[in-house]
Amino acid sequence: MAHLHGNAGDRPVRQRAYPTDLTDAQWAAIAPLVPVPTWMQGRGGRPEGYCHREMIDAVAYLVDNGTKWRALPVDFPAWQAVYRFFRRWRDQGLLAVLHDRLRRAVRVSEGRGPEPTAGIVDSQSLRAAETVGKTRRGYDAGKKVNGTKRHIAVDTIGLLLTVLVTAADLHDRDGAQPLLARLRAACPRIKLIWADAGYAGRLVSWVAETFTGLRLAIVKRTDKHRFQVLPRRWVVERTLGWITRRRRCVRDYERRADTGEAMVYWAMTAVMTRRLARR
């Protein structure tokens, strides 16, 4: 079946030659977590013509190298098929399912509970390409960036919990409200959130009034003129570094905000797959 083996009888097996290709160990770790298509469960739908390993390799190549859809190498399936796969997983929530399953597996492999109880939030302003429309972009005067802003929440070991893409002129406190609403829906056991001084003020009381049992703690600098590794803050900064190692995530090239969020999920999926395979 294509879900497991693809249609190798119709075309030669692709030789895995790119650094982003899943190794056998990585595929063994991720394969049991891949969402099963509905047609394999007897619920109808058209059977897939490509195995998921080939499709995941193709999307990982695009995210890591920042190439265009039409410029995918010819040894991958046709770019239209890869884009349909990407779009279906984005719109049907299958990418979020795979990402969350991987996060739980990594947490368990490191001796932690599958669901986090604490997290850290932060944001990152990105320059937007010409493909980003006027309604999606804004100007961040503090960072002097014309583009979009990526709001993320991570657990205490830096694994992504949720992401929200907005215009860059939206203040961190205003972006944190929908972000925390998503976070509470995805991780209801969250009880404590750390944030920097940009989130201080009315947001702290808003969190206490809106979400039962959730507290927002502000981590402040003690010396503004000296570099410091702040408790908990460095974890989310490291995650932002992991994400921007993928060239597609260095700038915002996407016409839709949910596509930009999907690129972040794919970037973190690659990070967790390698970590899980090593263990």
Image (cartoon, grey):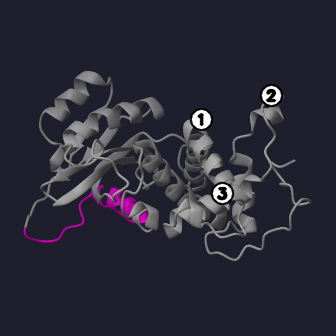
Mark nearer the viewer, 2 or 3 = 2
Crowding around mark 1 (Cα neighbors within 10 Å: few <14, some 14 to 19, many 20+) is few
Residue 210: which quarter of the image? top left
Asked if residue 275 can be seen in this view, the reply is no
Residues at circles 1 and 3 in contact by the CB criterion of under 8 Å: no
Taking depth in this image into account, of 275 and 73 the one nearest to the observer is 73
Q: Secondary structure at mark 1?
A: loop
Q: Is residue 220 left or right of residue 34?
A: left
Please name the residue shown 31% across and 61% down the image: 234
Mark 2 = which residue? 44
Q: Position of residue 64 (x, y in %)?
A: 52, 67
Q: Which mark is residue 229?
A: none
Q: Which residues are magenta?
A: 225-242
Mark 3 = which residue? 56
Q: Secondary structure at mark 3?
A: helix
Among the two numbered marks 2 and 3 on one chain, the one whose residue lies closer to the N terminus: 2
Placement of 264 over or under 161, stated as above or below: below
Separation (CA) of disc 2 from disc 3: 23 Å
